[in-house]
C-alpha cells in the first residue's frame, strides 16, 4: 500500500524532530565524559530536554502548512547542530596542538640524547685508547720485573753499588715505587672510567630506543588528531553550507506562513459559527445528554499534554497566538473515544483542522458543552449518531496543519473555548 503524501510529510517531520534531539544530545555528549554515572544522567536529562524542546517547537508550529513547518524544523535542526560541531572541531584542533607539542618535546629529548650518545662514544673511544696505553705500560712493568727477578725496587736501589749516597739511592727507590704505583693507579682509573662510560653508553642507547618509539607513537597520534580535526572541519563546513541553503529556502517560502495562518483563522471562524448555532439550540432546549458516568479520557492511555490550552509562542511570527484546545501525545492509529455521551454534531474536514468530529453534550452543569477532536486519520461515526462515553469516534492522525501524530481536544462552553482539562 503506497504511503500518502501527508503521511510521508508527517514521517519527515518526526525524523527532523528526532534529528534535532539527537543533535542536542550529541552536543552534550561531546562536552561531558561518558564514564561517570552523574555525566550519563546529565546526558540523559539533556536528551529529554532536547526532545521536549522539539515537541514544543512542533506544537508551536501548528497552524501553518506542514511542508512549511518542515523547512523551519530542518533549519532549526541544522542551526542547533552547528555549535556542537564547532565545539567538536575546536576540541579536535586543541587535541592536535597538544599532540604536536608532545611530539616536538619528545624529538627535542631524542636530539639531546643522541648528542649525549655522541659525547659518550667519544669519551669511550678516548678511554679505550688510554686503556691500551695503560695496558702497554703494565706489560712493560711486568716484563722489567721479570727480567730483574721481580725484586723490590727499594732493596735494589739501597744495595746497589756506586758512588751515589744513601739519600740519592733512597730518592731513586722512591721514584721507582711511585712510578710503579702511578702506572697501576692509572691503569685502574682508566679501567674504571671505561666501565663507567660503557654503562652510560648502554643506558643512553636504551633511552634513545625508548624515545624513538615514543616519538613514532606521538607522531601517529598527532596525525590522527589532525585527521580528526580535518574531518570535524569538513562536517562543520557542511552543516554551515546546508544551514545557509535551508535558510535561503525558508526565506523564499516564509511569506506563505501568513496565508496558512489566514486559512486557519478562516476555518476556525467557520467552525465557530456552526458550533455557536448548536450552542444556541442547547440553551434554548435545555436538553442534557451526558450520562451519570460524566467525562472520561479521550484516549486509552494516560494523558500527556504536549501543548496546553491558551496562549503560546509562535516561533515563526515571534508573537503569542491563542490555542483553542489541548494537544495530547498519541501515535497515529490510536483510538479516540467520546469523553461523554451525546450526539455527533459534525464529521467533517477543513484545511487546518484536518479530519474532525464534534460531539454535542447538551447542558452540563448549567452550561452548553460541545467537544471537538481534530487531526484524525479516520472517522468511525456519522452526523446525528448518538454515542456513549467511551465509544470509538475514530483514530489519531496528523491531518491538517499538524506537525505530527497527536489529538487536539477542545471544549466549547456556552460558545467559547475553555480549558479542556477542567472537564477530564
Image: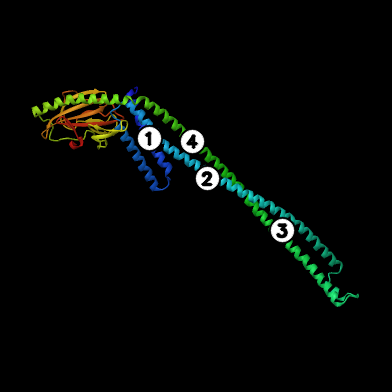
Mark 4 lies on a secondary structure that is helix
> On the image, which quarter does residue 24 sit in?
top left
Residue at which label 4 appears: 233
Which one is closest to the eye, mark 4 or mark 3? 4
Label of residue 98 in the image = 2
Mark 3 lies on a secondary structure that is helix
Q: Which label's residue is closer to the chain start, 4 or 3?
A: 3
Check whether the beta carbons of the residues at disc 4 and disc 3 lie within 8 A of each other. Answer: no
Q: Is residue 115 left or right of residue 367?
A: right
- Report the front residue among 54 and 338: 54
Mark 1 lies on a secondary structure that is helix
Q: Is residue 279 left or right of residue 8?
A: left
The spot of residue 339 in percent (x, y) is 19, 32
Q: Is residue 316 left or right of residue 245?
A: left
Question: How far is disc 4 from disc 3 in space, using C-alphas?
Answer: 57 Å
The spot of residue 226 in percent (x, y) is 53, 39
Identify the residue at image location x=69%, y=51%: 118
| Disc 1 crowd, CA 10 A, few/some/many (<14, 14-19, 20+) | many
Q: Which label's residue is closer to the chain start, 2 or 4?
A: 2
Residue at which label 1 appears: 20
Amino acid at each position: 500500500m503506497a504511503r500518502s503524501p501527508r503521511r510521508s510529510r508527517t514521517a519527515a517531520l518526526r525524523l527532523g524532530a528526532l534529528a534535532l534531539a539527537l543533535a542536542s544530545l550529541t552536543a552534550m555528549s561531546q562536552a561531558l565524559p561518558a564514564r561517570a554515572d552523574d555525566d550519563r544522567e546529565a546526558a540523559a536529562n539533556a536528551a529529554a530536554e532536547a526532545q521536549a524542546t522539539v515537541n514544543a517547537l512542533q506544537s508551536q508550529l501548528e497552524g501553518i502548512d506542514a511542508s512549511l513547518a518542515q523547512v523551519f524544523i530542518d533549519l532549526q535542526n541544522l542551526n542547533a547542530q552547528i555549535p556542537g560541531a564547532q565545539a567538536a572541531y575546536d576540541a579536535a584542533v586543541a587535541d592536535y596542538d597538544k599532540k604536536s607539542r608532545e611530539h616536538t618535546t619528545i624529538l627535542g629529548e631524542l636530539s639531546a640524547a643522541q648528542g649525549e650518545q655522541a659525547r659518550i662514544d667519544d669519551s669511550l673511544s678516548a678511554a679505550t685508547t688510554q686503556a691500551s696505553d695503560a695496558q702497554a705500560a703494565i706489560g712493560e712493568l711486568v716484563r722489567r720485573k721479570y727480567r730483574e727477578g721481580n725484586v723490590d725496587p727499594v732493596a735494589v736501589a739501597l744495595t746497589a753499588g756506586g758512588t751515589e749516597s744513601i739519600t740519592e739511592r733512597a730518592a731513586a727507590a722512591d721514584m721507582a715505587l711511585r712510578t710503579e704505583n702511578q702506572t697501576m693507579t692509572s691503569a685502574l682509573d682508566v679501567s674504571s672510567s671505561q666501565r663507567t662510560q660503557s654503562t652510560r653508553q648502554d643506558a643512553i642507547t636504551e633511552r634513545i630506543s625508548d624515545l624513538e618509539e615514543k616519538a613514532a607513537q606521538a607522531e601517529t597520534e598527532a596525525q590522527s588528531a589532525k585527521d580528526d580535526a580535518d574531518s570535524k572541519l569538513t562536517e562543520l563546513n557542511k552543516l554551515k553550507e546546508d544551514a545557509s541553503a535551508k535558510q535561503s529556502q525558508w526565506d523564499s517560502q516564509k511569506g506563505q506562513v501568513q496565508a496558512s495562518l489566514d486559512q486557519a483563522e478562516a476555518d476556525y471562524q467557520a467552525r465557530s459559527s456552526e458550533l455557536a448555532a448548536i450552542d444556541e439550540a442547547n440553551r434554548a432546549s435545555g436538553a442534557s445528554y451526558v450520562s451519570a458516568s460524566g467525562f472520561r479520557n479521550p484516549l486509552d492511555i494516560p494523558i500527556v499534554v504536549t501543548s496546553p490550552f491558551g496562549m503560546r509562542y509562535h516561533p515563526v511570527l515571534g508573537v503569542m497566538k491563542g490555542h483553542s484546545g489541548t494537544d495530547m501525545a498519541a501515535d497515529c492509529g490510536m483510538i479516540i473515544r467520546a469523553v461523554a455521551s451525546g450526539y455527533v454534531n459534525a464529521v467533517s474536514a477543513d484545511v487546518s483542522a484536518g479530519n474532525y468530529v464534534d460531539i454535542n453534550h447538551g447542558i452540563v452543569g448549567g452550561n452548553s458543552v460541545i467537544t471537538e477532536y481534530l487531526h484524525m486519520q479516520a472517522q468511525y461515526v456519522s452526523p446525528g449518531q448518538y454515542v456513549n462515553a467511551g465509544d470509538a469516534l475514530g483514530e489519531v492522525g496528523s491531518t491538517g496543519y499538524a506537525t505530527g501524530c497527536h489529538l487536539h481536544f477542545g471544549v466549547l462552553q456556552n460558545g467559547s473555548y475553555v480549558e479542556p482539562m477542567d472537564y477530564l
